[in-house]
Image (cartoon, rainbow, N blue to C red):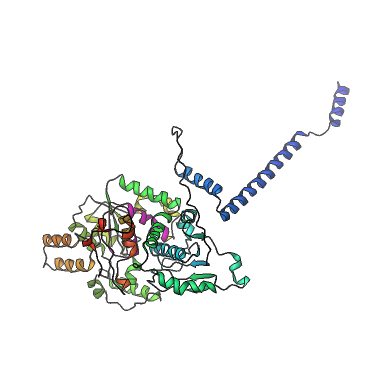
Amino acid sequence: MEVRSEGIQVRCDKLPAPVIPRTRLRIWFIRVCSSIVLWTCFVQLVTVSELWHSHFFSGITNRIYHITQHPLHVKDAIVQAPPPLPPPRNYTSNGFLRVSCNGGLNQMRAAICDMVTVARFLNLTLVVPELDKTSFWADPSNFEDIFDVRHFINSLRDEVRIVKRVPKKFSRKYGYTMLQMPPVSWSNEKYYVEQILPLFGKHKVLHFNKTDTRLSNNGLPVDLQKLRCRVNYQALKFTPVIENLGHKLIRMLQEKGPFVALHLRYEMDMLAFSGCTNGCSEEEAEELKRMRYAFPWWREKEIVSQERRSQGLCPLTPEETSLILQALGFDRETQIYIAAGEIYGGDRRLAQLRSAFPRIVKKETLLARDELQQFQNHSSQMAALDFMVSVASNIFIPTYYGNMAKVVEGHRRYSGFKKTILLDRKKLVELLDMHRNGTLSWNEFVDAIRQAHEKRMGQPTRRMVIPDKPKEEDYFYANPHECLCEGTNCDDLLGPSNSTHV
């Protein structure tokens, strides 16, 4: 037994080493290398397809997006394909237009629409706009962080060629100099054709470093006005992340019944900028003044708050807003969504409004903290959520007629003239003071408020034209009446009696 055991031991020692583990390792290594090569090739093909505007890969990515947004149900017999992309417009580009938008979200949104229009009638290639990162809000968001950049490029490709960046050959390294300038405000088509277009003969790239109100409200061809609307209402879609969370907010509100979106513009930056301190303590008024002086591009420094208020140039306070809403007929059961940032003075200043309307909510109270975490320190993305809710609301009421109020008003007109109550602040301040000093009873106050706003509910009306005074005209994006009816004649909708030409 011992000898046999030793023999067996000897025979075992002479067997060759196992080969199975080494073969498996080789196969695993080959598979990993092959996968890396295949994925590298796929990524390169997708990149090339983006440069060539490939129908094939665009179709694939569009299908992937729509499938993730609308999961396929097995019971459905028909799967709807995404809408086909418009055919690309073939034209010889006169150069590249680079733009840096300034201001908040809605000011930049309008500017983007204007710059697409400028690029279109000058036959330029537009570079995806750059967003303001140096304003009061210091939002680091890029265009693609707020808007669906692929949809923006593809949906407008039959009008204008849009690229993500200026080609490297048009850089200083290759001897090109880019001209930077702000175009003249409220300019028409003639200015851009005669003054701007010739500049591209020398400078292949032109950089507009300011874009707010650089295109006139009136006097443009109807096709250009309609293009501004197409960009605003169709091409500028928010990213899927923002869209999904915005729609969730809207669903949560609608499940509880009709709701009012109140754009309560009683925020620190607005009060400091406007110099309005009604209802503030002396310490708060001083704090707002220091902020106004801290920003050199806010030109007005010494402001008398009461004079500004009497002229209707101050946002309504939360306390004033409470009385106005009650006078307009809203009761305690009204669901109110506050579409705004942090109210100056916090809960203390909201106390009277909340007492009259206990069903007040805002995004911070409706959504979980982790849902909003990704938007912290990104004011434009936060504003995008408020924008979506405001457009979808049953009634929209802004307490200050700023950029958001104007752009939302225009969206609601475009969506079927949804009710928007445009408060006459100059008249309201007069009525409020009369009621508070006892010269106007509550019933008289209510009657006066309602009478003053009968024709300020977002009804169809022509945009006001004031020759040679563009700043005093109605803003195009608040009332784009050329886009609200078919053809070029809007008389059937607006009626000759609604003309507001001055």
With 325 as the anchor, is 135 left or right in this view? Answer: right
With 63 as the anchor, is 360 left or right in this view? Answer: left
Magenta span contains residue 186:
no
Q: Looking at the picture, tell me which residue is in the foreground, 46 or 291.
A: 46
Q: Position of residue 233 (x, y in %)?
A: 38, 55
Give the image quarter of residue 464: bottom left
Instruction: Identify the magenta region.
Output: 379-407
With 292 as the anchor, is 420 left or right in this view? Answer: left
* On screen, residue 11 above or below 191: above
Quadrant into which the N terminus falls = top right
Quadrant into which the C terminus falls = bottom left
Q: Residue at x 18, y 63 (%)?
A: 452
Camera sees residue 305 = yes
Q: Position of residue 54 (x, y in %)?
A: 56, 51
Magenta span contains residue 394:
yes
Q: Position of residue 456 (x, y in %)?
A: 23, 60
Q: Looking at the picture, tell me which residue is in the foreground, 6 or 277.
A: 277
Main secondary structure found in the magenta portion: helix
Residue farthest to the top? Answer: 1
Q: Looking at the picture, tell me which residue is in the foreground, 266 or 54.
A: 54
With 460 as the anchor, is 135 left or right in this view? Answer: right
